[in-house]
Amino acid sequence: MRGRMEPEPDLELLLLEARESIEAAQSYRRELGQRLQGLQAARRQIKESASQTRDVLRQHFNDLKGTLRKLLDERLVSLLQEVDAIEQETIKPLDDCQKLIEHGVSTAEDLVREGEVAILGGVGEKNEKLWNFTKKASHIQLDSLPEVPLLVDVPCLSAQLDDSILTIVKDQIFSHGTVASRPPVQIEELIEKPGGIIVRWCKVDDDFAAQDYRLQFRKSTSNHFEDVYVGSETEFIVLHIDPNVDYQFRVCARGDGRQEWSPWSVPQMGHSTLVPHEWTAGFEGYSLSSRRNIALRNDSQATGVLYSSAPTYFCGQTLTFRVETVGQPDRRDSIGVCVEKQNGYDSLQRDQAVCIGTNGAVFVNGKEMTNQLPAVTSGSTVTFDMEAVTLITAPNSDAGSSKLRVTISSSNREVVFDWLLDQSCVSLYFGCSFFYPGWKVLVF
């Protein structure tokens, strides 16, 4: 019997399956390549951190050796000086006594020679010499002897050296320093902001009780990290960030009741592509910082709204105002955003703008809302978040209106409302107005 013939496979189906297999193999190869890169990065981190740790340990212990040697040398010099002082102080009376004895010996020898000459002289001269000799001898106290101290009464120097210091130092040295394979804190998130980066970190060691954190950063082209924050918070916004420049961040912690800092976290690279927010320069009523992100209401009598230099606020972002210092409040004070700059107004409490007053009142297109936020005080942070809800286009026209969902937050409270605009807006200006000096506002 003839066997059953297998149907010939469809060529297009085979080609499709082959292509799918090739794509799957390529994807698999890419995944393996990424994992290989990850392994290589992990190896580099272990190798580089181990090498750095060895260098730190060698340098630290070399510094300790130098310091200990210096301290021991200083102590030796001090003790030797003490020996010299005791020796000089107690040897002087003995030197004086020796000089007195030597003088007495010399006097006695001279007297003996003079006496022997007088005895051996002639009869006529003998009487006169003997008389002069005995007269001279009677004036010399031959029975007065200087007192020489007993050996038990004079110092006998010695050094008392307690070898127990070696045990104490040994115990301290053997317990000095630790090597950690993982730092107790790590950077969790980097969030770009206009002109800044929010750095968030967290503990990764549950047994480590952190009291303070220390955040440092540097440009990727720099060799030097600098402190930017020390405190108990677990996030901080680093300002003065140049756009499109890479920065490295690292954080460490100090345990509760401890003085030394923990090892540094693994450095994380971050950058901001967002253009920094800046106030408009040259407005008579306000003085600006060098980066123009801080505005201070000065003593000028000029009034009006200080606007941003450009419409740099986009929907979907968070716009933050931080009030650094406060002055006398006024019901016309305002902090907020607007569609466009409009000179001639003394406040943002107008059409095509939303704002908050320093008393906490919220205004939408110039009308005060029923809901109110807490009054603004020194250190208050006010945030604006907006998202587009609808875009309405007029028939037979390119013009249209839009509605934005606005959230204004301050002091853990917020108000949410819809802001109807007579035009579609991709970006918005921000602004502020204060009638009395002393108000200082940072924007980011």
Image (cartoon, rainbow, N blue to C red):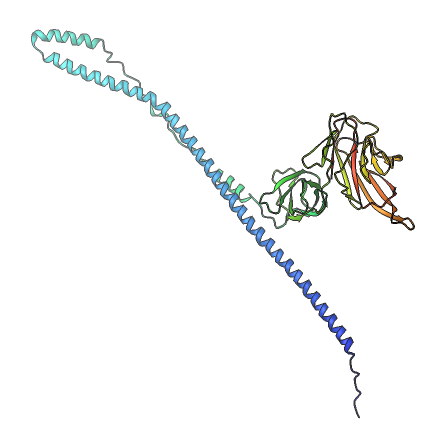
Seen as rendered, the residue at the extreme bottom is 1
**Residue 414 pos. (x, y %):** 83, 39
Q: Position of residue 421 (x, y in %)?
A: 87, 42
Measuring from the top left, give residue 429's x and y in whole percent: 79, 40
Q: How many numbered discs?
A: 0
Determine the residue positioned at 82% across, 36% down.
342
Image position of 118 (left or right of 19): left
Q: Quadrant of the N terminus?
A: bottom right
The residue lying toward the viewer, choosing from 169 and 201, is: 201
Residue at 9% x, 8% y: name it. Answer: 125
Q: Is residue 201 above or below residue 154?
A: below
Residue appearing at x 71%, y 37% in the figure: 293
What is the quadrant of residue 177 in the picture?
A: top right
**Compared with residue 272, is residue 99 higher up or lower down, i.e. above or below?**
above
Quick one: which residue is furthest to the right in this view? 395
- Identify the image quadrant of the C terminus: top right
Query: With respect to residue 87, does 431 lie above or below?
Result: below
Residue 412 visible somewhere in the drawing? no
Please, which residue is most extreme toward the front here? 396
Q: Is residue 176 left or right of residue 146?
A: right
Task: Give 354 or 269, whichever is nearer the viewer.
Answer: 354
Figure quadrant of residue 361: top right
Q: Residue at x 16, y 10 (%)?
A: 133
Q: Is residue 131 visible?
A: yes
Residue 123 spot, x, y in % from top left: 7, 8
Which residue is nearer to you in this view: 141 or 214?
Answer: 214
